[in-house]
Image (tube, grey):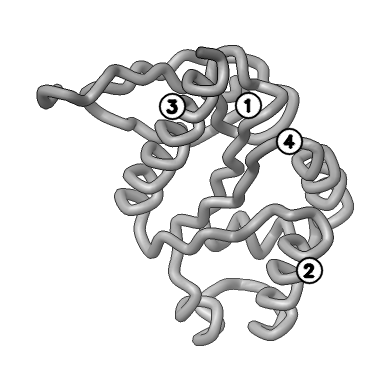
Amino acid sequence: MSQGIQSLTVLVDTREQTPWDFGPGVTSLRATLPSGDYSLPGLMDKVALERKSLADLVGSLTAGRDRFMREMERLSRFDFAAIVVEGDLMNVLRKEYRSDASPSSIMGSCAMIHARYGVPTIWCSTRAGAILYAEKLLRQNWNAAQAASD
């Protein structure tokens, strides 16, 4: 761990099938989260990240839409929530997924979720990029919560 970087504990939902490995400086603990796949100790009902591969996102917006919209409704009540995608928006535009859903429909659903529920979709291109960005998001939320409690 580099000097000046404090360690961070991240909670990983027990149902998460392919959990991220954040690497040095981050301790991952399994927990049953009320919503999302990743959160922080003491903030499980305030901060959540929903991890999605591109295929998983498309499936959640099509065949699994009802369940996913219920999840977005729950996340809308959080102080901070986001969908972090291990994929690129260009993959959607080029329709590099297995579904009859059009790229316009997928993008429209992501825009609707952001507008209606306040949950943005963050496109991170790769799994490694998603892990790094998610760590930064979680660390910023942790620091803000600690500052607010001082």
Residue 26 coordinates in the image, percent (x, y): 32, 22
Is there CB contact under 8 Å for labels 1 and 3? no
Residue at mark 2: 112
Q: Is residue 141 above or below residue 132?
A: above
For residue 65, which quarter of the picture?
bottom right
Which of label 4 and label 3 is nearer to you?
3
For residue 13, which quarter of the picture?
top right
**Badge 4 or badge 1: first in the primary sequence:** 1
Residue 132 coordinates in the image, percent (x, y): 32, 44
Q: Amino acid at mark 4?
A: Phe
Q: Residue at x 41, y 17 (%)?
A: 9
Q: Is residue 63 above or below residue 18?
A: below
Sort mark 3 into few (<14), some (14-19) or many (20+) by Cα contacts within 10 Å.
few
Q: Amino acid at mark 2?
A: Met
Is there CB contact under 8 Å for labels 2 and 1? no
Q: Residue at x 40, y 50 (%)?
A: 130
Sort mark 4 into few (<14), some (14-19) or many (20+) by Cα contacts within 10 Å.
some
Q: Is residue 126 above or below residue 79?
A: below
**Badge 2 or badge 3: first in the primary sequence:** 2
Which of label 1 and label 3 is nearer to you?
3
Residue at mark 4: 78
Nearest the camera: 102 or 111? 111
Sort mark 2 into few (<14), some (14-19) or many (20+) by Cα contacts within 10 Å.
some
Q: Is residue 66 left or right of residue 137?
A: right
Q: Quadrant of the N terminus?
A: top left
Residue at mark 1: 15
Residue 6 coordinates in the image, percent (x, y): 27, 19
